[in-house]
Image (cartoon, rainbow, N blue to C red):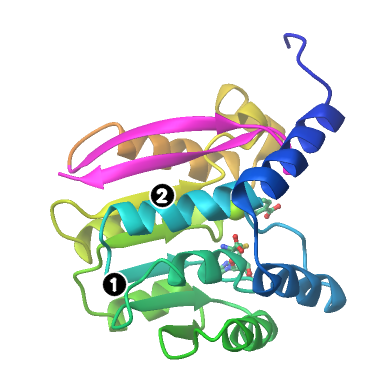
């Protein structure tokens, strides 16, 4: 691998950008703290990415958002805050204990009127939902990324914006054997994104979550 700045520099830069540009509120900090207090994995998006989701929801004038993979509701809060008063966000979470923390965090952010947390395997919840969604964020079990993309297209419309987290996964696309559980699903999703009905790109990122990235797509 080529040499790059050490991870400590990525993290220092991320911290500086977060406090200078992103400026998370107390509701974001609370959500992170609640997740730590409950022993949940620290795998939520970075603040810089949470703010990006917020801006993308706003820039796409989204009124209906679908999120697959809630955890403690950190990304949920960032996106829901970008919705108009009458907007709605459905977020899907497999684990009841995660959903419970997320609901409390969403309520503490004053967003319970705009957000519904659905508990269960996403593939069982998705058939119960009605489109069209304007914006879809996929961030759950990577094995199902292609299924989630197909659902995003089905529940979307031409113009629906889709973001898929963890699209680079430390470069796993070059060496799927380095993570046999997740890499094949991520690679299959990227291959799907290369053809209609998707029009997509992938942005690589570094920071507190290491070397990763996200796919940004629109339904044609
Ligand atoms: N989007 C969140 C992080 C999500 S982490 C944020 O950035 O703040 C991934 C979440 O997906 C975990 O809470 C995990 O329990 C959930 N998950 C895993 N498999 C799932 C499935 N099949 N259906 C729904 N949720 C799932
Ligand atoms: C993991 C999952 C994520 O969605 C993420 O952003 C980082 C890590 C994980 O399962 O390890
Ligand atoms: Mg993720």
Please state the extent of the stretch shown in magenta in the rendering: 197-220
Is 110 on the left-hand or right-hand side of 57?
Answer: right
Q: Are marks 2 and 1 in contact (CB under 8 Å)?
A: no
| Badge 2 or badge 1: first in the primary sequence | 1
Mark in the foreground, 2 or 1: 1
Query: Which one is nearer the viewer's eye here, 181 or 168?
Result: 168
Q: What secondary structure predominates along the stretch shown in magenta?
A: strand
- Ligand 1 neighbours mark 2 (CB distance < 8 Å): no
Do we see residue 142 in this rendering?
Answer: no
Q: In the displayed orientation, state which residue is furthest to the top.
A: 2
Q: Residues within 10 Å of mark 1 (few under 14, many from 20)?
A: many
Under circle 1, the secondary element is strand
Q: Position of residue 39 (x, y in %)?
A: 85, 73
Front residue of this view, candidates 55 and 97:
55
- Residue at 56%, 34% in the rendered image: 168
Badge 1 is on which residue?
64
Asked if residue 31 can be seen in this view, the reply is yes
Q: Which residue is located at x 44 percent, y 32 percent?
A: 202
Spatial CA distance of label 2 from label 1 is 14 Å
Instruction: Note whether ligand 1 is within 8 Å of mark 1.
Output: no
Residue 218 lies within the magenta run? yes
Check the picture and name the quadrant holding the C terminus: top left
Which of the 4 image quarters holds residue 152? bottom left
Q: Quadrant of residue 45?
A: bottom right
Residue topped by disc 2: 163
**Residue 175 image point, x, y percent:** 62, 24
Dot label at residue 199 = none
Residue 113 lies, with reference to residue 34, above or below; the image says below
Residue drawn at x 27%, y 54% is 60
Q: What secondary structure is marked by label 2? A: strand
């Amino acid at each position: 691998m080529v040499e790059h700045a050490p991870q400590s520099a990525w993290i220092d830069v991320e911290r500086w950008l977060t406090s200078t540009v992103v400026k998370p509120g107390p509701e974001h900090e609370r959500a992170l703290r609640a997740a730590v207090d409950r022993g949940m994995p620290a795998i939520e998006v970075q603040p810089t990415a949470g703010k990006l989701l917020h801006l993308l929801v706003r820039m796409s004038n989204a009124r209906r958002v679908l999120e697959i993979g809630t955890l403690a509701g950190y990304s949920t809060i960032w996106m829901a805050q970008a919705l108009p008063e009458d907007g709605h966000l459905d977020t899907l979470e497999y684990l009841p204990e995660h959903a419970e923390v997320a609901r409390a965090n969403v309520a503490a952010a004053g967003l319970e009127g705009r957000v519904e947390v659905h508990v269960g395997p996403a593939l069982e919840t998705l058939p119960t939902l009605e489109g069209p969604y304007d914006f879809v964020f996929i961030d759950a079990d990577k094995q199902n990324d292609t299924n989630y993309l197909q659902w995003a297209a089905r529940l979307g419309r031409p113009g629906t914006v889709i973001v898929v987290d963890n699209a680079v996964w430390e470069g796993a696309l070059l060496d799927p054997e380095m993570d046999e559980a997740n890499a094949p699903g991520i690679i299959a999703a990227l291959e799907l994104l290369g053809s209609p009905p998707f029009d997509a790109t992938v942005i690589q990122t570094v920071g507190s979550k290491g070397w990763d990235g996200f796919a940004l797509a629109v339904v044609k």
